[in-house]
Image: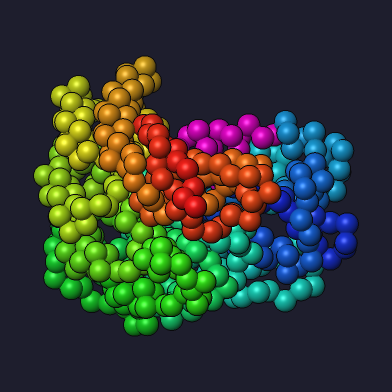
Amino acid sequence: MAHFLIYRMFHCIVFDMPSKKYFIITFGCQMNESDSERLAAVLEQAGYIKALSIEKADIVAYNTCSVRQTAEDRVFGANKVIAALKKKNPRLTVMLTGCMVHYGKKELKKRLPKFDLFLDIKDIPKLPTILGINKKTLAKEYLDIRPSVESPFSAFVPISYGCNNYCSYCIVPLARGGEYSRPAKEIIAEVKNYIQKGYKEIWLLGQNVNSYGIKDKTYWANKRLGNKKPAIEKGRCSFSSLIKEIDKIPGLPAIATRRRQQAGDWWLRFTSPHPKDLSDELIQTLKNARHFAHYINLPMQAGDDTILKKMNRHYTARDYLSLIKKIRAAMPNVALSTDIIVGFPGETQREFQNTARVFAATNMDMAYISKYSPRPQTVAAKKYTDSVPLAEKKKRFDKLNAILKRSALAHNKRYLGKTMTILIDKADNGTISGKTATYKTVETSTAPMNAKKLLGTFVDVTITKVRDFSLEGIIKR
């Protein structure tokens, strides 16, 4: 999925004794964010309370990401910090969960000697028992836990867990296991609960959201961008059908200005789809869905067919460009982003130039470009030598980033002078910012006394200035 590499701290919660508190540090994608919210719920149910800082905590949890080496390095570099904390608080418990658990407890304990507990995220319902607290668990299954949601207006809803794609560079299938789809009724009920509480934004999450519900997880790989309907698991449906059902959920009665009726009372987003699974039916469903916010992150990873085959991506560069063309034909105002890896093992200058050419042709609003780093136990790490020097990877990164800046700025110029509806997600004194339906960041300002009141609300902003990756505007009165 799209890895924005978020470093977020969930301010803590405690155990059976009033003095005990927890602190969660989260690395990785939105799925990791969602996992941390479920971990927080388990700790709260066990009696923990929030800590204002890591220094105040009695239990510290690192929820980890293994997608890139840089995320792991931050965790492996935490020994000194933990040692200092334990010196001040000898009873401090430090746990590690998330994707890095795939290394195994023996290896992790060797590299992280100051950590006390290593726990698979799917085993967090067992945490109170492991900690010796006589409390009933919230749920038997990890995804049945009702999360302690950090945001009062934006919620993550996992629809599946794990992955069956086995892209050669990716650790996720090894770290999270095979793909499992939640029952549709559970997902719809969870979304409905958030909407009835007044949430304005719902993110559907999965390592591969558009293979949700499919019985044969290799179906689309065999069909390769096919459009025939696959068999669906009992109690599930296709991703397209799930979107249709969720889109029927009404928001709270409007306080309604005309603008809010046009914008919809809540927005639906998802991440991340796989190009090989994105059917014509799904495109039409998204086009017609009233609540779908017109933004799609569609990872390309490379624009050269040889590299795509080595990555085990099951599509060609031509397939990808055709898909982009279909999406834009159906939804002309859609904003698109992608993920790209530069310096994959053996990537030649010619192969990289093919990626640069295809990337330029996609004309993206945004891209998340990363330098290849070998992930232990993956096919790419076992089969290929990491042969592209870091300096060369940086050059290739810089070239794609230059292409991105040009296309992003061109897209943003179309917003100049227009009035856009944004959902305010940050408010600091009189400075506020939010996202458009197309996921553009818009900065604006208001009187300090009004800033906090606007957090989590829709407002209309007239765009007065554009940059590569953000916009500025004035709130429309």
Give the x, y percent position of residue 136: 72, 76
**In the image, 274: left or right of 97?**
left
**In the image, 419: left or right of 359?**
right
**In the image, 309: left or right of 413?**
left
Give the x, y percent position of residue 252: 51, 75
The stretch drawn in magenta includes residue 72: yes
Please tell me which residue is depicted at 79% across the width and 72% down the height of the picture. Answer: 134
Q: Is residue 84 above or below residue 94?
A: above
Residue farthest along the front direction in this orientation? 477
Q: Hey, which quadrant is residue 107 in on the image?
A: top right
Q: How many marks?
A: 0
Between 39 and 296, the residue placed more toward the observer is 296
Please tell me which residue is depicted at 34% across the width and 82% down the height of the picture. Answer: 234
Residue farthest along the top direction in this orientation? 391
The stretch drawn in magenta includes residue 425: no
Between 124 and 189, the residue placed more toward the observer is 189
Residue 78 can be seen, yes or no: yes
Q: Hey, which quadrant is residue 203 in on the image?
A: bottom left
Give the x, y percent position of residue 452: 65, 52
Q: Is residue 313 above or below residue 20?
A: above
Please tell me which residue is depicted at 32% across the width and 19% down the height of the picture. Answer: 395
Q: Write down the region rendered in magenta.
A: 64-79
Q: Is residue 322 above or below residue 184?
A: above
Between 354 and 100, the residue placed more toward the observer is 354
Residue 177 can be seen, yes or no: no
Please say which color scheme the image uses: rainbow
**In the image, 170: left or right of 105?**
left
